[in-house]
Image: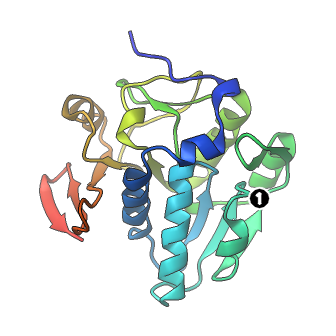
Amino acid sequence: RLPISGDASTYLFHREAASQVSEKRAIGELAAKLFTDRERLFFDSGTTVLECGHSLCARLEAAELSDVHVVTNSLAFGASLAQHCSVFLTGGNIRSSRMDLAGMVTLQHLERYHFTKAVLGADGIAEDGALTTTDEETSLLAAAVVERSQEKLILADSSKLGRRSFVPYASLQGESFTLITDSEADPAILAKLQKRGIKILIAQAPKNGSTANLLQTNSLALISR
């Protein structure tokens, strides 16, 4: 039986942001390297996705990318990102525990868009590929984004793998999904997920100032960043 990872009442953005910090930063940096010019992106409000947003800001500031548009429900980084590219903040009800917007207005707003890539987190990823979260509102939002996105980048540190949270929002299945996690991920769980036809990238958090590496498990090729 899979462990259950929390419920809606236990999620606190600032607590999540303080856990697995180096792993989340490495995952976010790796995810941001996948972006190209003329992207139309969605960023959810997860703390690992936040790190990807910071890395996207750095790439935009360095003029590595152009013509990037971002839609987000996050209240944590929209303003800083807007200094470097076009940002659309969804409407909706403010959820202080998640530092985001959600609800019916948010879902209606999302109906206007189609994304080249969606950058999403998960509160738990089960061995059967179920992407799960803590509450119905978050699940409905993430499911709507998945339906409107060509590629889905799922950012989750290794502590989220092999866990099932309260509500599923999608299933990891097919090459349109890329899971990005860290080197502490259980190889047995990754092997099961890889059989579902997804891409898997592993970010190595730097230690003692060393440069992080990444492993793309579908080709078993070690690539230096």
Q: Is residue 36 above or below residue 44?
A: below
Amino acid found under the numbered disc labelled 1: Arg
Quarter of the image containing the C terminus?
bottom left
The answer to which image quadrant residue 127 occupies is top left
> What residue is shown with label 1?
112
Q: Is residue 179 above or below residue 70?
A: above
Residue farthest along the top direction in this orientation: 1
Residue at image position (59%, 21%) is 166
Quarter of the image containing the N terminus?
top left
Left or right? Give the position of 170 relative to 174. Answer: right
Residue 6 at x, y percent in the picture: 57, 23
Residue at image position (45%, 49%) is 155
Camera-nearest residue between 150 and 37: 37
The answer to which image quadrant residue 102 occupies is top right
Residue 147 shows up from this direction: no
- Binning the other alpha carbons within 10 Å of mark 1 as few (below 14), some (14 to 19) or many (20 upward) gives few
Residue at image position (20%, 49%) is 218
Residue 97 at x, y percent in the picture: 73, 40
